[in-house]
Image (tube, grey):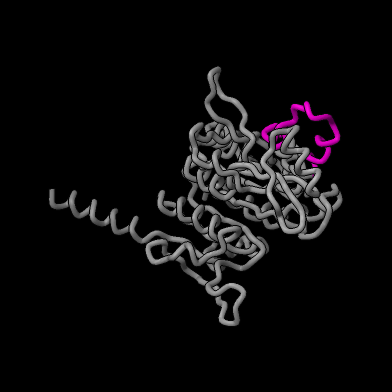
Amino acid sequence: MRIVVALGGNALLAHGLEPTMAHQREAIGAASTALASVATEHQLVITHGNGPQVGLLARQAAAYDADTDFTLDVLDAESAGMVGYLVEQEVGNRLPAGRGAVTVLTTTLVARDDRAFAHPTTFVGPVYDAEQARRLEQYRGWTVRRDGAWFRRVVPTPAPLAVEPIQPIGVLLDLGYVVICGAGGGVPVRVGPHGLEGVEAVVDKDAVSALIAEQLAADLLVIATDVPGVYEGWGGPAAHQLRLVDLVDLDLTALDAGSMRPKVEAAGRFARSGGRAVIGSLPDLEALVAGGAGTQVVDSSVALRAAADAARVRHG
């Protein structure tokens, strides 16, 4: 099969740890054994988050003056190389002889008039006190909002329209390479007066992973998290895992908007395109691929429409 695996942030850095190279390599090394095992039998694309890495790079950029041109899109591109190198090496070292991994820097096209630009909501970078936040709004033109006891920068999260380049990724897969791409949702770009231009935004990485899977005509999208699947009643005494989620019957508002809902929405997008999607724990990756673990996400209306179309064809 052609499989896209979207790695959650915990696969790159355990919760609560500083983003040192040692911590990142340890986490990625642990994830790479399961990834390499799947890659021996299937074509594999790996996408991943970049939040801690961009935060680290943002702190480094903040050491410069207010006129620095290290914008968020540039930091996204930097982080793609940083994380891609580590994943490429750790996975590559576990692949059979003659196989390899390669990192592809991808951009994600967004609409210039996306409504998200008027309502930035996604926190990025480090925390600041009230005075620091005021200065950053004044001198850097940032939008800053309270995050608990501190303040952080917020940026828009526009919807992804297309990911590029896709064709070379398909060629690399056919040649036997594992491809790492879509870092943190890809580097966001939009069409400007003189062509493409970078955007200071964050595109949801799971939505981009689903789009990459769709554009590559993948057979399976795996959204790997730190829980075994989607739970009903999460956090309550009656919480239980759902083995199957049908988007026709699901109330998305019942899911946590900040964590699981975007994953189910992304899985649903790919399911509606005709692929198979599953959400589950990375250590269960082989069982997720085989269909024996996690939460399968389907849209029964797709099958119903296909059956109706087939019936119309039969009856002329």
Name the residue: 57% across, 67% down.
229
Residue 61 located within the stretch drawn in magenta: yes
**Left or right of 8: which side holds 193?**
left
Q: Is residue 176 left or right of residue 52?
A: left
Which of the 4 image quadrants contains residue 262?
Answer: bottom right
Residue 105 image-quadrant placement: top right
Question: Is residue 35 a member of the stretch shown in magenta?
Answer: no
Task: Please provide percent x and percent y for residue 316.
Answer: 13, 48
* Residue 190, above or below 270: above
Q: Which residue occupies 81% across, 35% down?
A: 61
Q: Is residue 193 visible?
A: yes
Q: Indicate the position of residue 65 as horizontal and vertical percent values.
A: 83, 29
Name the residue at the bottom extreme: 237
What residue span does the magenta drawing correspond to? 56-77
Given residues 263 and 56, the one toward you in this image is 56
Q: Residue 312, how many percent across, how many down?
A: 18, 51
Picture coordinates of residue 166, whole percent (x, y): 54, 34
Q: Considering depth in this image, is 284 or 224 the residue closer to the camera?
A: 224
State the residue at coordinates (73%, 33%). Answer: 140
